[in-house]
Image (cartoon, rainbow, N blue to C red):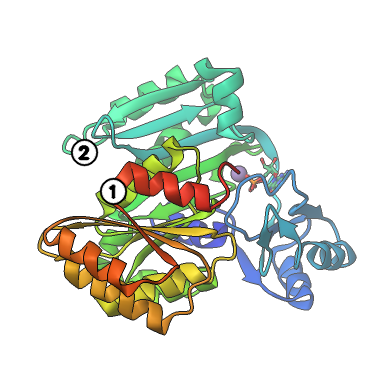
Amino acid sequence: MDLFEYQGKRFFSSYGIPTSEGEVVEKVEDAVEVAKKVGFPAVVKAQVQVGGRGKAGGIKLVNSEEEASSAARAILGMDIKGHLVKRVWIEHASDIEKEYYVSVTLDRGAKDHLILVSSQGGVEIEEVAASNPEAIKRLHVNPIDGLTEDEARQLVADADVDLQAREGVVEVLLKLYRAYVDGDADLVEINPLILTTSGKVHALDAKVTLDDNAAFRHPEWEEFRATQELDGREKLAKEKHLTYIGLDGSVGIIANGAGLAMSTLDVVNQVGGSAANFLDLGGGAGADVMAAALEVINTDENVRSVLINVFGGITRCDQVAIGIVDALQRVDIQSPLVVRLDGTHAQEGREILLSHGSDKVQVEATMIEAAKKAVALAGGER
Ligand code: GDP
Ligand code: MN
């Protein structure tokens, strides 16, 4: 789960990382009240889960009630890279001396935590990585050993953080690492972490991704979840207990097992197509689950064909086929289906599908052939 900035700041401050006091509001009048309360100059910030809000005009410094009002009016309802702004966060503006970047994330390849520190903060880190990679210092941390104060200090020095900010940045980094581990995050990023003109080190932005697998031990995440913006399809998939992630291609994907679902995306790509989604049916693939999956994919108007890729292990392919036939009676599917069944009772499954005789359903024996067919039906490359 990705947090909004205001939630990320709440998360950070619960671990002792300094942030500015502020409030999140949905109305222009409330924005003015909060701006008065935090004091001018204040900053009005769009709350959307996308970076580069500053450049997109979603962040404005205001010096009066009138300015606060017009800034809030301009930003609320704004579309930032396809995200509608429903809330703004208002805090007292900080006087910036320097901007830094710090983050902790999981490096799956290295099986370690990865800490990044840069004295070139404030701009997108990808830009720094491209134009000046030397300016980003990295430290892999073994999860069992954790991060020591000496290591943090060395990293901050290597990154050339200004002397007067070093103690403060080290302190934030240690707390950030703690927040990341104890808070069960996959990513914590502060960009910019600032040195103020009065010499304080302070988080000006917050980007946090929490590990949903750890939700069971964090009842306090409920308040974060309440404002998560799932689109209609994601909501529907969630209600149906399907693992669904929307993508922007044209081939709808249904597979059983996350590994097979991912391989299916790869194969679709390999033959020149693009997947409209990731969808893992999970364990069983009976009629209910299949109908639910088709229902979810059916609401995606970018979908031109659907590729069902099932490997029968404990799940028997004849049951899956019955599920598909049954589901087709319940869901008025808009796109042609290409089905590949393999494994337990695959032959029986294929026969059931063929005897069903729907012109909507085509059966292919291999994953690659099925992908080619689905991509061709989707109109080839996009
Ligand atoms: P992002 O563009 O979505 O990453 O939003 P940020 O919260 O990182 O803000 C972008 C930029 O706006 C920062 O790098 C700052 O330069 C500027 N900014 C944000 N808050 C303040 C503030 O309180 N004072 C000043 N002077 N600038 C700010
Ligand atoms: Mn930022």
Q: Is residue 234 visible?
A: no
Give the amino acid at mark 1. Val
In the rendered image, residue 35, in percent from the top left (x then y), is placed at 74, 66
Residue 244's place in the image compared with 33, above or below, is above
Residue 191's place in the image compared with 8, above or below, is above
Q: Residue at x 79, y 52 (%)?
A: 61
In the rendered image, residue 132, in percent from the top left (x then y), is placed at 58, 17
**Residue topped by disc 1:** 181
> Any atom of ligand 2 within 8 Å of the CB at mark 2?
no
**Residue topped by disc 2:** 143
> Any atom of ligand 2 within 8 Å of the CB at mark 1?
no
Which residue extends farthest bottom? 330
Please tell me whether mark 1 sits on a helix, a strand or a loop: helix
Front position in the image: 159 or 265: 265
Give the amino acid at mark 2. Pro
Q: Residue at x 23, y 37 (%)?
A: 146
Q: CA distance from mark 2 to mark 1?
A: 9 Å
Front position in the image: 29 or 324: 324
> Seen in the image, is 334 located left or right of residue 180?
right
> Seen in the image, is 357 located left or right of residue 19?
left
In the rendered image, residue 338, in percent from the top left (x then y), is placed at 39, 58
The 10 Å Cα crowd at callout 2, few under 14, some 14 to 19, many 20 or more, is few
Q: Quadrant of ligand 2?
A: top right
Q: Residue at x 29, y 65 (%)?
A: 281
Please tell me whether mark 2 sits on a helix, a strand or a loop: loop
Could you tell me if the residues under marks 2 and 1 are in contact, i.e. CB atoms within 8 Å? yes
